[in-house]
Image: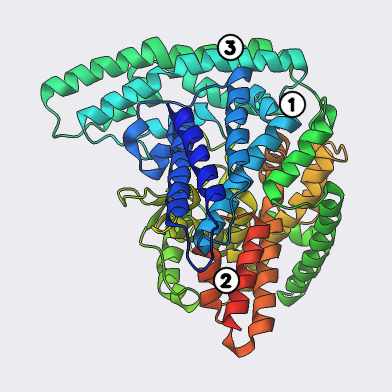
Amino acid sequence: MKDLKYALLVILLAVTCFSQQLSAAQPNNNLQAVLAEIFADYNERQLRRDPIEATYRGDHRFDDRLPRASTAADLAADVEHDQQLLAGLSGIPTASISNQQRLSLGLLKYELSRSVARYNSGVANYQRMVPFNQMYGLPTTLAQLATTDGAQPFNTPADYRRWLQRAGHFPAWVDQTIENMREGIASGLVHPDIIVDKMLPTIASLASEKGSKHLFYQPITAIPASFSAIEKKQLTSEYLAMINQQVQPAYAKLYRFLRTEYRAKSRSTVGLLALPAGEDYYRDAVAEYTTTTLTPEQIHQQGKALTLSIFEQMKAIKQEVGFAGDMAAFFHYLRTDPRFYYTSEQQLLDSYRELKAVLAPRLNRLFLTVPAADYEVRAVEPFLQKSAAAASYQQPSADGSRPGIFYVNTYDLPARPNFEREALSLHEAAPGHHFQVSFAMEQQNLPEFRRWAFNAAYVEGWALYAESLGTELGLYSDPYQRLGALYLSIWRANRLVIDTGIHHYGWSRQQAIDWMMRYSPVSDTDASAEVERYIAWPGQALSYMTGAVKIQQLREQAAAQLGNRFDVREFHQQILASGPLPLSMLEQKINRWVQQEK
C-alpha cells in the first residue's frame, strides 16, 4: 500500500507540474501540499525501515519491532523504490515553491541519489555482509536499550510487553545476519581479523549469562512500584523465558559463529583496497561522509598540511609552559604525569558536570537561542567500555521525556587526560552535538525527515567547529586546556591522513598508530582504538575536519562581506536552524543569507 501511495503521489505531482504554468508570483498550493505529503511519506518509510531510530526520536509506535537484516532482494527492492521516487521528483519546477520546501526537496533528492549510488557502487551490499562491528550495530544497540536508561520506555506493562516482542525478534535477525556474513565469506567481503577480535568480547559478555544475571533482566530489577504483584510475577516469568529461550541463545549462536567460523575466514589486511572493488567502495565512502567531490588524494594532502600546522601551535604551548625537552618528551610527560589524569570514575564524571554548569550562562554570547532540551553526563555502559570511543552523544526525545546523553568513557583512567575536558565537552554536548541535534529537532516548521537527517560532514563538522568557540565562551584560559583543544583538533587532522592512508594507500595498522602517536600525546589505548575504528568504519573519520573547515570558511567569508553588520549569533542560527544539510547545500544557503543581509 505504501508503494502504491508513492506511485499515486508521483503521478499527481507530474499532472500538477505539467498541466499548469507555475508562477513564482502565485505559488501553486496544490504542489506545496503534494510535496509535504511526499516528505511525510518518505519519513514514515524510513522509520519503518529502522524502527529503533523511531524509538530514539521518541516515536514509540514501533517499539515492538527491530530493523530487518536485509537480503540482497530487499536491497534491490529498496533501491528500485528510491530510483522511482527520484525520477518522479526530478522534473519539479522549484521557482514556485518556498525556500524551505526548495531546501527540503533538494535534501530528499540528495538522500535518494546517495541511496542509489551506494547500491550501484556495491557499498550497500558490502555493508549488508559486515552489518556490525566492535562499536556499532544492532547487538550492542539492543543491549543499550535493555539497560532501561536509554530510549526504550519501561513505564507501563504495555511498554514491558513491547520490549518482549522487540527482543523476541532478535533470534531471526541473528539467523539472517549469519547468512549474510556467510555470503561475505564466499565473496571475500569480510572484516579484518583484528576487528573480529574486538567484537568477540562484547558478544561473549552478552552470551555468557542467563536468567536474572543477564543484562536483559535489568527492566525487571527496575520494575515500577505501581505495577501490581500479579503483573510483576507474570512479567518476571516472561522476561526469564525471553532471556533463556531467545536472547541468550541468539547471542551465544552469534558468538559461536564469529569465533569458530567467521574468525578463521576473516582477513589479515585492514584497508578496503584489499577487497574486490575496494577502491570503488572507498571513493563512495569518501563521497558519503564528506558530501563533497574531494578525492582521497586531496584529502590526504590536506590532512598532512593541517597536522603540521597544528603541531607547530602545540610546540608554541610547550615553550609557553616552559617545558625544556623535545615534543616526544613533552608528549611522554603529558601521557604519564598524574596531574593530567583523574583518580576515580566519579571525579571524571563530576568534572564534566561542573563544566556544564559553568558553560550554561555563557552560551547566549554566541547564540540567539538555546535548545529547550537538556542533556546529562553519564558513563559508558560497562559492556561497551573497552571498545567505545572516549566520548559520544545520544539524542534526546522529541517529546521532552528523555534528555540528551553525553557519554564519557571511564575505562582505563590513565588514558583519559583532563586537559581535553573543555574541548571534548564543547564537541559532544553544548554547543556541539547537543545544540545541533536539539535545534533541528525543535524546528517544527521543517519536515520530519529534515529535523532528524544525518549528514556526517555537517553533524561532525559542526561539533568540531564548536570546539573552536572555547575562547569566545571564556574557556581555554589554561594553556593545557588550549593544548587539549589542539590535541583534539590534530586528532581530526590525523584522521584525514590515516583514513586515506589505510583505505587508499594501503597503510598497515601499525603505520597508522605510529603516525597518530608521532603528532599527538595520545595514549596507546586511544591510538589503537581509534585506528581500529577507522579500519572498521571507512570514510566516517573524514567528516569531522572536512565539515569544520567548511563552516569556518563560511563564517570568515560572511564576516568579510558583512563587516560591522555581521552577527555571529545570527550566523550560528542560520547554520543550525535548517537541520543537517550536505555541505554544498549549506554553502548555498549561507551565501543567500549573506546577500539578503547585504
- Residue 186 placed where, x, y %? 74, 12
Left or right: 295 as drawn, with respect to 459: right
Task: Identify the element where label 2 is drawn.
Answer: loop
**Mark 2, other Cα within 10 Å: few <14 / some 14–19 / many ≥20:** many
Q: Give me the residue at 36% from left, 51% from top.
A: 403
Q: Give me the residue at 63% from left, 23% from top.
A: 76
- Residue 515 placed where, x, y %? 82, 49
Quadrant (top left, top right, bottom left, bottom right) of the C terminus: bottom right
Between marks 2 and 1, how big is the CA–CA gap?
39 Å
Q: Give me the residue at 37% from left, 48% from top.
A: 397
Nearest to the observer: residue 372 or residue 250 = 372
From the image, tell me which residue sits under label 2: 470
Q: Is residue 367 above or below residue 227?
A: below
From the image, tell me which residue sits under label 1: 192
Residue 88 seen by the camera: yes
Q: In this view, does 372 lie above or below 225?
A: below
From the image, tell me which residue sits under label 3: 256
Quadrant (top left, top right, bottom left, bottom right) of the N terminus: top left
Q: Quadrant of residue 95?
A: bottom right
Q: In which quarter of the image is residue 116?
A: top right
Q: Which mark is residue 51?
A: none
